[in-house]
Structures are given as structure tokens and as C-alpha cells.
Image (cartoon, helix red, strand yellow):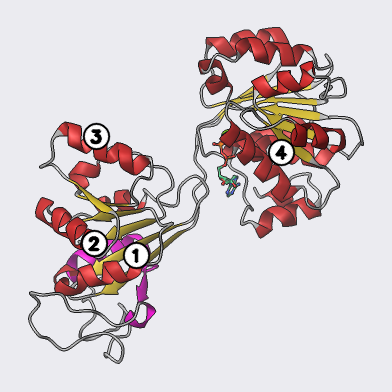
Amino acid sequence: MEFKDMDIRPELISNLAQHGIVTPSEIQARSIPAIMAGHDLLAESETGSGKTLAFAVPMIESLQHAHGMVQAIALCPTRELAKQVAGEFDKYLKHTDLRTVTVYGGVGYEPQIDAIPDSDIVIGTPGRILDLMERNALKLDGVRYLVLDEADRMLDMGFIDDIEQVIDATPEDRQTLLFSATIDYRIEVISKKYMRDPILIRAKSQEVRGHLFQGYYVVNPWQKISLLHQLLRGHKDWVALVFCRTIVATDHVAAELAKRGIDACALNGDMSQAKREQTVKEFQDHKFNILVATDVAARGLHVDGITHVFNYDLPDEAETYVHRVGRTARQGANGDAITFLSEDDYRKFDPIMDRYDDEIEKLTYHAWGRLERIPPSPPRPPRGEGRPSGGMRGAPRGGPRRGPRR
Ligand code: ADP
Ligand code: MG
């Protein structure tokens, strides 16, 4: 099913499509019709599964701008999450005259107070919403939709009293929509108290994957470091995992990148547990952006927002390749997986190509300029442009030798 098969206006469908959103995730496919039919909802689905649009789409569809009356309110645990939710709304309500306002603490009241009278949808953290209500700047008696987003986290953060006060200020005939990564007894308590015959949706197939681009460069082993440097430099916003085969290689690559002014750290089994944990934490906190790791060291590593996976060395198993590249293109974001292929690896690359139906694109050198030669490289003729190449298929010489297709 696609969004266009749902009972949604074409303008909204095309707004979504312009942002590459065509097929609803499971939580969206199941929540949107239930909300549009007027039900209260208890929805459980993991982070990155597209919960925001699950409630934004029906609200954008059904609400109309009404000056001076807040019609919907979404409670979020943090300022960042409130901003993210508001960002999604603002992207997709362009064809309507609806307005949102985002309210959270730590900043002045005035701009928020000024924006409220003209806003239909209030998105914010419970504390500031209450503050604004107490200052008579926010009235919730026209609210038709009440959303508790990331409810489990709001409860973890101790917002239950605030949440209850906000709910009590909304009309009883509102529609209450609760979204959470996990639904536990605490949430059942809320639902018993504040919801009418809620529909419970637990989404199984979870995360929204973005588009994964896969490509490879044919490169001499001694030029890999130069290639990696060329690709990384000037891209401070990339968050990359570079996979090497050996511990020695991870140290070497991280050091060579650091020498060239690129913030990179190694992660391998030679490091103490404490040092490894510290490195992972710093990477997760984006203190540096390039992590050079062995497969073993990277096992179980969870980092959001990886934009690039580099196979500096090819793994022995196609399965390992699949695991590596699966660390990017997550939570609806796009990602690139770039493999450095040297002649010795052609044989190992065949099963990987088979697995991806030959869809891994051959990339050429001119995309990244001239190669600098790294000592102690033996003097060899540079390869690259002008080289009789022609991609994987039908390349008699110089290209990877394809084994018989299975
Ligand atoms: P959650 O709240 O479940 O953690 P979000 O609503 O923040 O997830 O969505 C995560 C990302 O996925 C966002 O960048 C969003 O734009 C994107 N996204 C949501 N739904 C889809 C979809 N149906 N197709 C592609 N990307 C989507
Ligand atoms: Mg969310």
C-alpha cells in the first residue's frame, strides 16, 4: 500500500512524495486509518519507525485554520524532539493554512506567547505548556487532538503530574493519541484514566530505512588511504564507519587520517574495555566523525546518523558486508556504502554482487581527483581514468572476474 491508496488529499500526498515519502511504514499504515475514523490510539513502535507522520497526517488532513483557537496539542519529552515533530508538521502542511508553534523551556516566553494566538497546533514539552497555561497565554478548551509522543520517555523523565494537568485542561471529547516505543503498565494506567476504548497497535516491522547507495572503487592497496582521505576531506558533516580487516590496519588508517587533519579514531580488540567504551561514547556524541574499526570491535555498536560505511578492506563473508552496510541508511535517512576493491578481493566481491543483483555501482577516479601516492608504495603506473575498465560485467581484464552465476 502507498499513501496515495489512503483517503488523503492529493496535495498532501505530493508534499510527502517530494520528500521521498511514498510508502507508509507499518505504524503509519495502521494508525492513520484508525485516527481518521475517530478512535483513541495506543501505538507502540520503535524509534525511527515514523511515528510522527502517523499522527501528523490525519491532523493535517482534518484540521482547518481557526484564528485564536488551538485545536491540537502534542506533548514531547524534550525540546529537540518537539522541534523535530514541529519540523515534520511544517514540511507537510504547506498546502494548508495551518500553523504550528513550538514551545519549550530554557528560552524566553515572549516569542512563544506572541505566536500562540495564530497557531492551530501546539507542540511542546509539558513543563512549558503548563507555564504558558498558568500565564493565561495558552487555552486548551478548543483542542480536538491530544498527542502524547514518546510517552514512555516522558514518564521516565517524571512528567506524569504535568501531563495529567495538561490533559485535564482539554475537552473530554478530544481524541487522545499515545505513541511510545514500549507500552507498559504505566501507560496502561494513563490509558484507563484518559482514553476511550483505545485501539492498541503494536507495529512489528519497525524501522523506516532510507535509500542505501552502494558503490565501489577499484584501487591499489597502497592507494586506499589516499582515496579515503580524498573522499572524506571537505565533508565535516559525514559520520563514517570505516571497516578494516586487521587491528593493525585500523590503527594505521586512523593515524594516517589524523595526520591529514581528519578527526578519526580506531576501535579494535587491542584497546582496553574502558578505552573502547570511551571511544564509542565519543563517537556517539559526535566528538569525532570517523570511526575506523574491525568487524569484531564494531559488533553491537549502536550509533545514530551514520552517513557512510567504507569497506576499506572487503570482509571474507558476504554476510559481514550486509551487516556493515546495514549501519547506514537508517531511520529514514539516506546512506552510502563505499567499497575499496583491490585485485585480490575480486573473488570475495562476487557473492556480494550476486546478493545485490549487481546493483553496486562502479565509481571512477575522476570523481575524486588525482591520487597522491603514499610511501612506501612501489612506483607503479597510476590507474584510473583512461584505463580500459568498463565495470564489473564483461570486463575481460582488469575488472573483477565473475564466477559462474548461480
Ligand atoms: P519515530 O518518531 O518513530 O522515532 P520519526 O517520525 O521521527 O520516527 O521518523 C523517522 C524518520 O523517518 C524521519 O526522518 C521521517 O521523515 C522518516 N519517515 C517517516 N515516515 C517515512 C516513510 N513512510 N517513508 C520514508 N521515510 C519516512
Ligand atoms: Mg518520534
Tell me the CA gap for discs 1 and 2: 9 Å
Does residue 40 appear anywhere in the picture?
A: no
Tell me the CA gap for discs 4 and 3: 38 Å
Q: Secondary structure at mark 2?
A: helix
Does the residue at mark 1 contact the one at mark 4 (Cβ under 8 Å)? no
Mark toward the start of the polypeptide (1 vs 4) = 4
The image quadrant that residue 30 belongs to is top right
> Considering only vertical position in the picture, is 260 above or below 318?
below
Dot 3 crowding, Cα within 10 Å, few <14, some 14–19, many 20+: some
> Considering only vertical position in the picture, is 97 above or below 212?
above
Which residue corresponds to mark 2? 257
Mark toward the start of the polypeptide (3 vs 1) = 1
Q: Secondary structure at mark 4?
A: helix
Which residue corresponds to mark 3? 277
Q: Please indicate whether residue 103 sits to the left or right of residue 183 in the image.
A: right
Tell me the CA gap for discs 3 and 1: 25 Å
Which residue corresponds to mark 4? 56
Q: Secondary structure at mark 3?
A: helix
**Front-most of residues 4 and 214:** 214
- What residue do we see at 64% from left, 26% from top? 125
- Mark 4: which amino acid? Ala
Magenta span covers which residues? 346-367
- Mark 1: which amino acid? Leu
